[in-house]
Amino acid sequence: MARLLSRNIFQSFSDFGGCSALVRNVAVGREARWWSNEASPAVKVTAPRTSLNQPGLQTEEQLGLWYTLEQDIAKQLFGLGGIPKQFATQCKTFAETCLMIRKPALTTIDYIKKTNLALPPNKFILYGREGVGKSLSLVHITHFLSQDNWLLVHIPWAPRWRRGFKEITASATVPGRYDHPLDAVIWLQHFKSQNSQLLKTLQLETSEEYKWSRREVTEAGAPLIDIVELGISRARFASDCIMAVTTELKKHATHQRCKIAVVADGINTFFCLTSRYRLEDLTYLNPENFTIFQAFMQLFNNNWRNGVVVASVDSLANDGARRESYLPRYLLRQKVRSALILDGRH
């Protein structure tokens, strides 16, 4: 067998025209070893790709293939988050962003196309073990939603606001509530980047007056983008601006002025019981008291129309003591199961 392997190696080098450079070195028993003074020709290995780069046109015929996400689209949709950090590093190294076409993404896209928008929003939950592609499937679905003219409310990695926040301050408007000034500004920039062109087309306006301070007021009938711009420029009001934006979007969607897609990676973190922020009495704050948590959680309800919710559940998004299983019934506590995955209409 050893000799046969050696001959096979010799034959393989011979096929590349390098047999003259092979020299027999040592024979020990029946084993023969060879080395080459010439470098073997480089063989370029490429992943199987498809030229069909529109997610809405992809079918099971492209299952397992890779498609290219154009750089300007990748920057617009995911420049401020959404693509896992390690994968983003690889994309930067190879100067391109490619996504594998996975079955869960294709199935979800097909369901979204068939969704009856006159009913409360359907909820689609992706789940699985760590590293199986949940986040990148959400990237694939988000790309489709953007091309299909859905207004995106995209939460790249929700656990960051519960345990990896930049700053927490007591709310200046609602006692007992707490804001994420810097994180809220980043999210508003992300929202603007993803939806700027669509917001110009839709011309959405505020339905009521918003008073931020004695001098700063957003009048009823003002462009919705004004609230976004205010939050970006004034971090103090950024969390309240997110609350105002999500409230207005629900109203506009229900009145069929737009269709809203809520995309959340690690949605189960919204229903954890503790955060890493300590109060003055050294107890940990319940995340329900975060302004931005309340803002986004209202979009998980069934009291609006013309939208969908696409999310992933991840054991890493849970508390450290509650990570034994990756299944949704475990990660989503009893409090929210009926709302997210057990509602008979979905």
Image (cartoon, grey):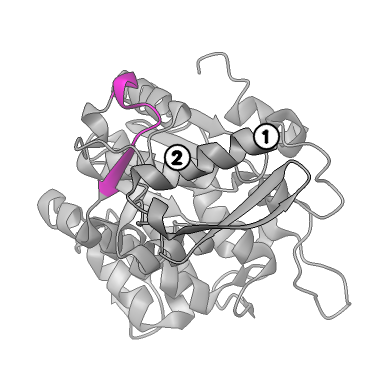
Q: Who comes first in sequence, dot 2 or dot 1?
A: 2
Q: Position of residue 284 (x, y in %)?
A: 82, 67
Residue shown at the point (54%, 57%) measured from the top left: 157
Q: Which mark is residue 260?
A: none
Vertically, is 52 above or below 92?
above
Q: Residue furthest bottom?
A: 215
Residue 135 or residue 93, whichever sits in front: 93
Residue 322 or residue 326, whichever sits in front: 326
Residue where numbered disc 1 is placed: 336
Residue shown at the point (39%, 56%) measured from the top left: 20
Q: Is residue 161 magenta?
A: no
Left or right of 291 in this view: 36: left
Q: Position of residue 159 (x, y in %)?
A: 63, 58
The amino acid at mark 2 is Gln
Vertically, is 47 above or below 175?
above
- Identify the image quadrant of residue 285: bottom right
Q: Position of residue 187 (x, y in %)?
A: 43, 66
- The region drawn magenta spans 59-68
